[in-house]
């Protein structure tokens, strides 16, 4: 089987590596003043792909932590997917030119789906869509606003657009270590042809075990944040499980 990808997350706020609770900028915990060093530690641990979010950029609608991102890119060889404040083709192109492997479009995916389609056409395999949902409805602008559109409705808009992946985050669980919302994430993956990445709430090795079960075979992977920083998820144990499942 294809190996499930476990993406360690680096969320950037004011140039530092933080974790939020349910996307609330007022409820942030700083885990590192040096995101590049954090990225290097993830690389050394054996992770194969890095997930980054420019939190300030998500609220501002344009990149705000470019220096920190560039420091990470200079430090590690891992492919990096990055979201937060991506609203124009110029921003997409600029990040790709700097070495980002995959650009995540979130708010603009709801506001301007044609932009996503144009970006996916121009940069095949390089565009992911971030779908962040609160009670099944898509939230935008750094999760400050909730729309009337469901995650599935938004995902279906990009079925034939050439989007590389959908990153589905259950906001209610994000940063709370309650476990991933497997039911909603798997249902989304089953309904779409686009690969889906689970995000929000990954809590322990039990979540990783469940991700490797046949029911989750359509998922491309999952994002791990606070569990890694809090020490609840041991990288070596998680990666060994994944490697064992791939070999099986």
Image: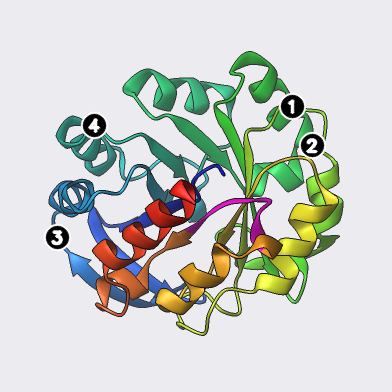
Element on which disc 3 rests: loop
Image vertical order of residue 176 relative to residue 116, above or below: below
Which portion, as a residue range, is magenta? 216-222
Q: Residues within 10 Å of mark 3 (few under 14, many from 20)?
A: some
**Image x and y of residue 105, in percent:** 59, 41
Upstream in sequence: badge 1 or badge 3: 3
Element on which disc 2 rests: loop
Q: Which mark is residue 117?
A: 1
Image vertical order of residue 224 relative to residue 26, above or below: above
The residues bearing labels 3 and 2 have C-alpha atoms spaced at a distance of 37 Å
Upstream in sequence: badge 4 or badge 3: 3
Q: Which mark is residue 77?
A: 4
Q: Quadrant of residue 121?
A: top right
Q: Magenta span has 219?
A: yes
Element on which disc 1 rests: helix
Q: Which mark is residue 33?
A: 3
């Amino acid at each position: 089987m294809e190996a499930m990808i476990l993406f360690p997350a680096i969320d950037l706020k004011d140039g530092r590596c933080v974790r939020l609770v349910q996307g609330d900028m007022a409820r942030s915990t700083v885990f590192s003043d040096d995101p590049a060093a954090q990225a290097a530690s993830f690389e050394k641990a054996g992770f194969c792909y890095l997930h980054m979010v420019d939190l300030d950029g998500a609220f501002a609608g344009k990149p705000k932590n470019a220096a920190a991102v560039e420091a990470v890119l200079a430090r590690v060889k891992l492919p990096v997917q990055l979201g937060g404040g991506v609203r124009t083709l110029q921003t997409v192109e600029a990040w790709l030119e700097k070495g980002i492997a995959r650009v995540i479009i979130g708010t603009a995916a709801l506001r301007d789906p044609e932009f996503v389609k144009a970006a996916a056409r121009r940069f095949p395999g390089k565009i992911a869509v971030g779908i962040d949902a609160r009670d099944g409805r898509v939230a935008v602008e750094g999760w400050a606003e909730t729309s009337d559109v469901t995650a599935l409705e938004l995902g279906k808009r990009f079925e034939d657009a050439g989007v590389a992946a959908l990153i589905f985050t259950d906001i209610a669980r994000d940063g709370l270590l309650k476990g991933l919302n497997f039911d909603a994430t798997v249902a989304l993956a089953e309904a779409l042809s686009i690969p889906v990445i689970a995000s929000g709430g990954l809590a322990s090795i039990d979540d990783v075990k469940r991700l490797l079960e046949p029911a989750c075979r359509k998922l491309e992977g999952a994002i791990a944040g606070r569990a890694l920083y809090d020490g609840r998820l041991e990288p070596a144990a998680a990666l060994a499980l994944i490697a064992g499942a791939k070999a099986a």
